[in-house]
Amino acid sequence: MAIQGAVRLVFLNSHHRLYLWHIMKKVPEKLGGLNEYKAIKKILKRITYEVVDIHDFEDTYLKMMAEFNIDKNEWLNSLFKIRDRWAPIYVKGIFWVGMSATQRSESVNAFFDGYVGPTTSLKQFVEQYDNALKSKIEKENKADFASFNSCFPLITDCYFEKQLQEAYTNEIFKLFQDELRGMIYCNLTLNGSHGAVCSIQVSDIVKGKECVLRKQVVYNVYYNEEEFDIKCSCQLFEFKGIICRLICKVFLEKNVKDIPSRYILSRWRKNIKRMHTYVLNCYDDPQTSEEKQRYNKLCSHFTKAAEFGAESNDKYIFLMKCVDEVIEKLMGNTTCMEKFTPMSLEATDAPHQNFLTPLKVRSKGRPPSKRKKSKVEEIIIRNKKKKAQTKGHVAQDDHCTQESVVLGLTMWMEKLTRFWGSQGFVF
């Protein structure tokens, strides 16, 4: 209860669920001593995993408690009070990205699978965490590459399947094709219509966990043809973000060619750049790292601009207009970057004086000449060159520093030469 209160205060827009795996694991412990334990357990599992209507869940739960005279059981009563936090029928209307609460820490186990175990030490965990993160990044990069360069073949002639093949990543499109295959078990019946909204009853054959045909289930689909709005009582789209087979069946019967963009979530699109991919890591290739570095530099500059823009309403409006204008140009007109010239590079009206290199004049006296060196001097010079090359490899940083100093002195001497040359002095 303490965690529940903290989550409600800190994460205002979050939905706190309970692990169904923990609850079902406690069933033998809490109800194992009852005479009709097996029958109660069977009914409890059925209403937990199979019911498709909230009223059906509540009625069956209360009837079970009254029939077996367990309506005073504290554990069952406490579960019924918080049923909206653990029963799957209550959480289907909320977007959970398809994550279920039937298994214990399924996302964490999948991340560390094969890397850590019960006997892993703290030192080994740090090392294995780095390996797991590297493997995760490599798998994401491979999946992105596969989605951009390959696709699953179409299984129907539906127009919207081709649309989603181009929009979805391969993994999500594969899940959508499973829904298309399930359309063969769906049958439509028109209940009635109220203006542009029509109510359609769709029957589907639901399969059990062991792929055994269980029973026929009826769902209701409400379709507004004018606003192109559709909703199914199975709530698969609300829960998982993918349109269900029942909606696909209605689209097929209504000859819908293109699915509205609001039913294609951006998180499932292959052309969306995800924010976490801009985080620098040591496993990136150089080209990708350069892009991330540019992104981080831009963010730092935008942060400075945001600090000034937040000082007053006028600055805020001005900055928002500038940002919107720049975004529009970057998205719609690629030639704007060619026409743009930074202020620091623009020509100024200040006079610019060019200094010419002084003419070379032959100096007086005997011209310099090289004296012929002896064999001993040549050997000494060669040895000095070899030592200099060896020192250059060992002390590369010092060499770079010396080069920068020499370069600075050279540029300084050139300026002095140009100045004194303009005054008539000859060197």
Image (cartoon, helix red, strand yellow):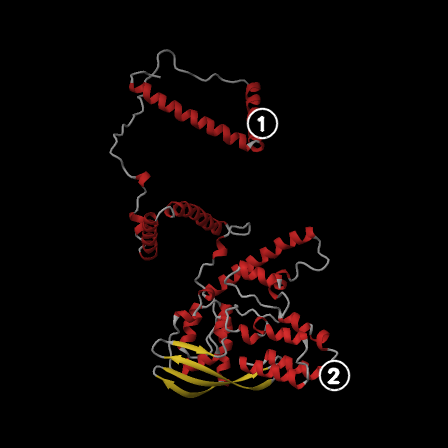
Amino acid type for the residue under numbered disc 1: Lys
* Label 1, residues with CA under 10 Å away: few <14, some 14-19, many ≥20: few
Q: Is residue 124 above or below residue 167?
A: above
50 displayed left or right of 412: right
Count of all numbered marks drawn on residues in the image: 2
Q: Residue at x 57, y 28 (%)?
A: 386
Extreme residue in the front direction: 72
Q: Nearer the viewer, mark 1 or mark 2?
A: 2
171 displayed left or right of 307: right
Identify the image quadrant of residue 89. bottom right
Q: Secondary structure at mark 2?
A: loop
Q: Residue at x 59, y 58 (%)?
A: 135
Quarter of the image for the C terminus: give it.
top left
Disc number at residue 252? Answer: none
- Residue 152 can be seen in this image: no
User: Which tag, 1 or 2, sits closer to the chain's start?
Assistant: 2
- Residue 296 can be seen in this image: yes
Q: Position of residue 324 (x, y in %)?
A: 33, 54
* Label 2, residues with CA under 10 Å away: few <14, some 14-19, many ≥20: few
Identify the image quadrant of residue 36. bottom right
Q: Is residue 311 above or below residue 389?
A: below
Identify the image quadrant of residue 198. bottom left
Q: Is residue 184 above or below residue 361?
A: below
Q: Position of residue 422 (x, y in %)?
A: 29, 20
Amino acid type for the residue under numbered disc 2: Asn
How far is disc 1 from disc 2 in space, using C-alphas?
A: 95 Å
Q: Position of residue 101 (x, y in %)?
A: 60, 70
- The residue pinned by badge 1 equals 387
- The residue pinned by badge 2 equals 35
Q: Secondary structure at mark 1?
A: helix
370 displayed left or right of 73: left
